Image: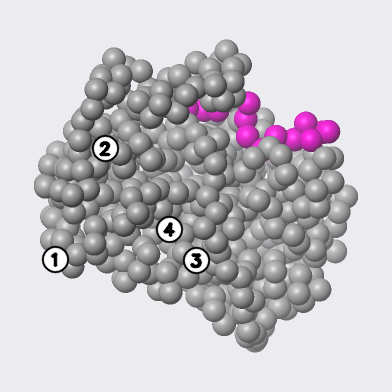
Amino acid sequence: MTETIVLGLDGANWSLLRPWLEDGTLPNVAALREEGVHADMQSCLPPVTCPNWRCYTTGKNPGKLGVFWWEKIDTRSRTLTTPTSRSFDGANYWDYLNEDGHTTGIVNVPMTYPPFEVDGFLVAGGPGSEQSGYAHPPELGDELDAEGYRLHPETPVTARDDVDAAHRVVDLIDRRLSTFRDLLEERPVDVAHCTVFYVNVLQHFFWRGAPTRRAWQVIDRHVGAIREEYPEATLLLMSDHGCTDIDTVFHANSWLEREGYLATTRSATDRVGRFGVNKKRVSQLAHRLGVHDLVVRLAPDRLKDAVPDDESGFKREQKLARVDWERSTAIASGQGLIYVLDDDEATTERLIADLEALRDEAGRPVASEVLRREEAYSGPYVPEAPNVVFDQREGVHTSGAIGDNPVFSEAGRWEAENVRTGLFLAAGPAVSGDVDDTVSITDVAPTVLRSVGSAVPTDMDSEGLDLFGDEVALRDPIDVRGDDSASDESVQDRLADLGYLE
């Protein structure tokens, strides 16, 4: 019998859903709020899919995991890598469940590719997953392939006018949840999880527009069906972060360059971008013509390096080639992360003060909080973290691209950006306790363990939420070490298409 089901709703928060909860658009989620307990949920900084989905599955903050964002800049070797499922330290909660004799079914959690072996089944997901070798056991992937299961839409949403592609993404979300329910019926497990990732892609490009509203209606229908099919189960709804509309884009590297922290070089290839040629436009055209994979395979590396990622300029490894390292003291990633070269303390202190004082053109602060890495994280990997971590003010999107950008601009590709506050809900006959107004994403893994009577590892950041009237039991952790694996170019291209890698 399935005892606990977790539905991960990427980018969801109560403020996003409130109009639809009030007007009856989401009756099943509204009913669960009345039945169970709910709260806001704080994600780890930065509030992004990677690393927060693994903060959820491990119960640990990034300082214990060794992964802080979609990209890691090594300022000493001057290299940039993107992580895989194997880049993270720490066991996932299903490892403890399996060791205790509980079976698990995990579907579509980002940063689980290559897939992990589990007692039950695991179907990898998120933008870092590939369409081959994505399931455990492997024969499950063959079965899903035969049924037409797709991890990603054939035509991605890459701009606000991709409305037809957006509605096909809604169909993919519907199919994802139907597959999850079918798997639970055909392969019963004790604890199950399914993440709906692409709903946040719709929110990024359309905010509360028609495609997003339709997607949430699909999600709500499946939530109601799962509640009916498993009335005795504990049902948890949670998200990796929230979402809100954008009023300002902050081009962090342009600001660093203006303030003298960053120096860049220019070359003849930069003229390509000035003529409006960029990878995003080429990718969109190639997808529409059905030749995207052919273009990626045949285009020479020299040409790829010469073409900017999009109208914002150069990203990923390209941007590192534009840095004049000898004259620079800092470089930014996206969404609130800045690396200080040589870990210079004086530069770090000045940078924090400048960010705290920084206002946009309307006089609003860019950051709601500016932290040293030691304040943002705890654990053995803190020395590898970006030196400065700032929580963007709601309404700000921080771009890490290097190009001819102003420091501030109006909303660009995205209409909405991530915020740190997501949502949490627990319902079911076993839920007898209550929660504070705000919980942490690292509370969820130990809570899942406690929902079936498993002990909580001592290296998790939390002992979980008091929802079941149980006494907390503790156990020694399973030692799992990450490695230096990195995703390949196809994954990086997908992240760039979606607007995640800047």
Identify the secondary structure beneath mark 1: helix
Graded by Cα atoms within 10 Å as few (under 14), some (14 to 19) or many (20 or more), the crowding at tag 4 reads many
Cα–Cα span, label 4 and label 3: 8 Å
Graded by Cα atoms within 10 Å as few (under 14), some (14 to 19) or many (20 or more), the crowding at tag 3 reads many
Quadrant hosting residue 126: top right
Type of amino acid at the residue the image marks with label 2: Arg
Cα–Cα span, label 1 and label 3: 28 Å
Magenta extent: 145-160
Identify the secondary structure beneath mark 3: helix
Point out residue 100 in the picture as x, y percentages from the top left corner: 77, 76
Mark carried by residue 322: 2
Q: Is residue 369 left or right of residue 104?
A: left
Point out residue 325 in the picture as x, y percentages from the top left corner: 22, 48
Q: Earlier in the sequence, mark 1 or mark 3?
A: 3
Task: Check if residue 496 falls in the magenta segment.
Answer: no
Tell which tag, 2 or 4, sits nearer the viewer. Answer: 2
Q: How many numbered discs, if any?
A: 4
Type of amino acid at the residue the image marks with label 1: Ala
> Residue beneath label 3, please?
65
Cα–Cα span, label 3 and label 2: 30 Å
Q: For the stretch drawn in magenta, what is the main secondary structure?
A: loop
> Residue beneath label 4, please?
68
Q: Is residue 302 left or right of residue 33?
A: left
Q: Nearer the viewer, residue 77 or 37?
A: 77
Point out residue 296 in the picture as x, y percentages from the top left corner: 53, 25
Q: Earlier in the sequence, mark 2 or mark 4?
A: 4
Seen from this angle, which residue lies furthest top?
A: 289
